[in-house]
Image: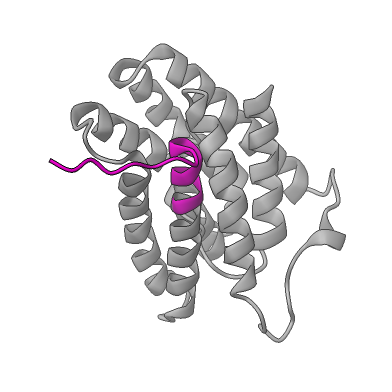
Amino acid sequence: AVIVLAAIISALEYMIFIDKNQFAPSGLMGVATMIQHTTGFSVAYMTAIMNIPLCIASYFAVNRHFAARTVVYTSVTSLALWLLQNGYVDVSPFVYYTEDGMSRILAPIAAGVICGLYYGVVINLDGSTGGTDIIAAIIQKLRPELNLMWIIFAINTAVAVSSYFVYGYQMEPVILCVLYSFLASNVSDKMLKGGKSALKFE
């Protein structure tokens, strides 16, 4: 139930803060957003299609519980996005978008913080939000000393760089994507580590 709620929040976050603001968020959702921008093919369908082989791979490479929870999250997210994009649920009064482009930086800040919160919750429940999270989980299983959130951030930065070529060779979408990814990674990392920290001197 918590993963389903997190998936619905992620779809709402996408439609309210990302869809109209001309930047790719992060991971496979970012790739799906860029495909939608260039071809018009719905991000709801694209995320479902791209996550199917990765969820199958996670079943064998990580574990079945992780794969099952990831399937639940990605399926609900895709369904919620489809419902929102096709007007079955109207969120237009809440969409953050300015006609003159002013304050666009606030969209990735808000979206990044919200994303970090549900990232942390889903990962704490031994699941993932799909896409690059699955790739990062497989890498961490091979290299457990690496920090999961920073693996995801590194992959997401590569997505951000590619958005430069998709959004008319402009730096602004790249900066917005990096900002979004950085905030999401930081908030998730804080949630996973908790409020306590310690140093050991030898």
Span colored in magenta: 186-202
Q: Is 12 drawn above or below residue 175 in the view shown?
A: above
Outermost residue on the left side: it is 202
Q: Check residue 201 for magenta coloring.
A: yes
Seen in the image, is 64 located left or right of residue 78?
left
Q: Is 101 drawn above or below residue 47 in the view shown?
A: below
Image quarter (top left, top right, bottom left or bottom right) of the C terminus: top left
- The residue at 45%/52% (across/down) is 186
The colour scheme of the drawn protein is one colour
Image quarter (top left, top right, bottom left or bottom right) of the N terminus: top right
Q: Is 175 drawn above or below residue 31 in the view shown?
A: below
- Which percent across, then down, holds residue 92? 83, 60
- The residue at 38%/33% (across/down) is 134
Out of 142 and 54, give the one closest to the viewer. 142
How many numbered discs? 0
Out of 163 and 202, give the one closest to the viewer. 202
Residue 4 visible in the shown view? yes
Out of 89 and 185, give the one closest to the viewer. 185
Seen in the image, is 152 located left or right of residue 2?
left
Seen in the image, is 137 located left or right of residue 168?
left
- Which percent across, then down, holds residue 88? 84, 43
Residue 5: image quadrant is top right
- The residue at 18%/43% (across/down) is 201
Seen in the image, is 8 located left or right of residue 91?
left
- The residue at 38%/73% (across/down) is 165
Residue 161: image quadrant is bottom left
Out of 188 and 19, give the one closest to the viewer. 188
Residue 42 visible in the shown view? no
- Which percent across, then down, holds residue 36? 55, 57
- Which percent across, then down, holds residue 166? 43, 70
Q: Check residue 79 for magenta coloring.
A: no
